[in-house]
Amino acid sequence: MRIVEREQQILRVKAASFHPQMKEALEKQIRAEVITTVQSTIELALVEELLAERNKMSVTPRRSGYYSRLLNTQYGRISEMMVPKLRFGNKEREWKILARYERNIVGLLAYAGYLYVMGLSLRDLQMALYFLLNSVLSTTAINRVTLKVQAQLDQERLKKIDKTPVALIVDGVWVRVQYDLGGFKVDKAGHRRRKRKAQDRVILCVLAVCRDGSSYVLHYEIAEDEDQAAWEALFAHLVARGLNPNAVKLVVSDGTKGLLAAMKQFLPKAQQQRCITHKVRGMNRYLTYQDLPALDEEGQALTTEKARQQRWHQLKTEAYAVYEKPSKTEAQAQLTTFVQKWQALEPKAVHAFQWGIQRTFTFYAFDKELYPLIRTTNLAERFFREFRTKSDEIGAFPNEASCLTLFMLVVSFDHAKHDRFSVANTS
């Protein structure tokens, strides 16, 4: 890709990013991590600048450790910036990197972090940082910075769970991630590139729902599929982080395969709640549209398309009404009424709705205040919708770390916007 095309892509990504919309709560939440990352970036740049200057000297002095200094940034003060020294000439030295930073460093982490997350290679990030620092950092130095950022995110994502929620909502969102196949190839421009291939992967996400009605993302990880092995691995990771397997009483999910078997092994006290939204929407593909009405409720003629839309609207509205009943007994009675009305008109759809429907009534065993939260996977779907708007811009992520980083940013923004707990905040 030519530089001008990359620049246009960068500008599109920047315009689509949600950084300008960040509220004060999110800024406070990530301020400490931002300062640490900015400090790491500048310290590595200073070492590069010093080594470049030393190579130009007629008499080459040895390195002589570091001294600390203050540096103010837009995110706060770095109290101990480690500046490298030589054996002589330190007082007279004018640091170009620091001078450039103090004039134009606004948004360093925002730009560098977003550009890397949105799919830029290390060389592309090297180019982006050049415009901020007016100095080309080696790809090794940039790689060390990005690895530190990823390490900080993993530390947050995998920190100890001290309080186990009563319910978990589990779901997955599919992505494309590039993987190294080994070896090299020569592209059309004659450049030697590593052989890579984009493969389908799924981000498995776990949301916690507490008895007081609060909710937050507890865990997420990449898997090859939504199957028993993947769910077993995920639950094992949660238990290893400190989740009490006997304290989880409910797991909310769609119809994913292998989940029940994994629950039986790792969450022996938990029941499954099938998502009522998936259950209702699942009828749509079984509609046969028998005996469609010719007129609407106001006596106006209906086209075939309008009649189909009306049939589906009536069917799903009355299906959802089953779950609006205040008790399981009343819900089952409403289900009987629903079946009697629609069985003759839409037998396949009604059969699909009834199949395994008892698992959609599990939420009635819990407090009424929790019903809206624990009868669907809608909480997870909201994160996924926001994530897809960002990931669609990328296509295939360059690696798993960038994929998880983007997901974390979406989660952090949503938590701050709605004043929820931070990711996996169990204190």
Image (cartoon, grey):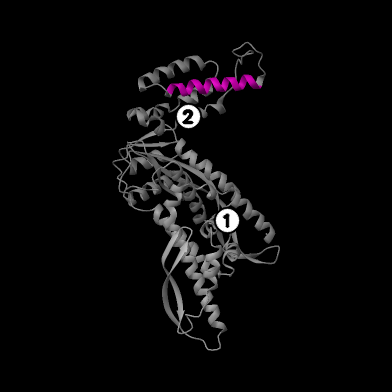
At numbered mark 1, what does the secondary structure look like: helix, strand or loop? Answer: loop
Cα separation between marks 2 and 1: 36 Å
Is 142 one of the magenta-colored residues?
A: no
Residues in magenta, as a range: 305-322
Classify 59 as above or below 374: below
Disc 1 residue type? Gly
Find residue 383 and report its horizontal and vertical position in percent: 49, 42
- Residue 37 is left or right of residue 12, and the answer is left
Tag on residue 279?
2
Classify 63 as above or below 215: below
- Quarter of the image for residue 252 reads top left
Residue 180 visible in the current orientation: yes
Task: Characterize the local packing of mark 2: few (<14), some (14-19) or many (20 or more) Cα atoms within 10 angstroms.
Answer: many
Tag on residue 119?
1
Disc 2 residue type? Lys
Q: Residue at x 38, y 45 (%)?
A: 421
Of all residues, the one furthest to the bottom in this rendering is: 59
Circle nearer the N terminus (2, 1): 1
- Residue 340 is left or right of residue 398, and the answer is left
